Amino acid sequence: MLQLLKAALLSLVAIAITTAVMAQDTRTQTVRFPRGASGTAIEASITGNQSVRYSIGVNAGQRMSVQLDTDNASSYFNVTAPGAREALFNGSISGNSTSVVIPSSGNYVIEVYLMRNAARRNETANYSLTLYVENAAAAAPVQRPQPSSPRPNPTPSRVDTSMMPRFCQGEASAKFGVRPQDLTTNMAFKSGNNYVVQGNFEGSDGTTFFNCWFALDGSFSYIN
């Protein structure tokens, strides 16, 4: 009987330790864009049961675009609205790119994780998470004394030219229903009064070509 009690006690201790370790595998990080910018790219990695919850404050009516580029096919992200129990976007179902209009203001959570099969094998995912919020630069409050002279107009929302190919992938993924990793986008180049990113993907009907157009201030215009 004593041996059974010891075995049971050891099992409880093992479960408690495992639970504690798993609880530490999720970390939270607040996302802040560089001053005057409406987007950023975060490079990181996760292994096994690890996940990262990126918290970002957005306002109702803004469009938030998220894209995950990863070297592990079992790595995805979910987007959860403040106070919600179910994900607003589930990457394992819908792919690794989304562009949504924010229904209500608050802090939204973008969680990057590995699927259970990959987590059990203790696999690693190296990833780049690209976030863009329409008009974020113009909407972000600036904490500084009020100047006596009139303040200049706020910096327009923009996507840096180096981020335009990834942003274009997200827009194309949403428009054509193709996973981002199956899309090819080239570097942005200037064409008249616009920046253009050219891309393509292979489908059942052959190769489909598309162009993403951006204004000179970096704001996204349209895709065709």
Image: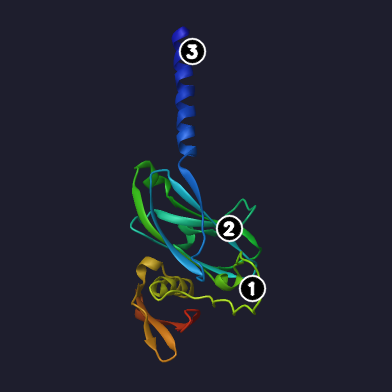
Q: Which mark is residue 108?
A: 2
Q: Which mark is residue 107?
A: none
215 to 141, vertically: above or below:
below
Nearer mark to the viewer, of 3 and 1: 1
The location of residue 133, given as percent across then percent down, is 54, 69
Q: Quadrant of residue 79?
A: bottom right
| Contact, mark 3 vs mark 2 (Cβ under 8 Å) | no
Q: Amino acid at mark 3?
A: Leu
Instruction: From the image, tell me which residue sits under label 3.
Output: 5
Instruction: From the image, tell me which residue sits under label 1.
Output: 147
Q: Amino acid at mark 1?
A: Pro
Q: Residue furthest top?
A: 1
Q: Give the CA separation, mark 3 to mark 2.
A: 46 Å
The image shows a total of numbered marks equal to 3
| Contact, mark 2 vs mark 1 (Cβ under 8 Å) | no
Q: Residue at 44% x, 62% y: name it.
A: 96
Q: Amino acid at mark 2?
A: Tyr
Which of the two discs, 2 and 1, labels the residue nearer the N terminus? 2
Q: Residue at 49% x, 23% y: name it.
A: 12
The location of residue 52, given as percent across then percent down, is 47, 50
* Residue 205 visible at all: no
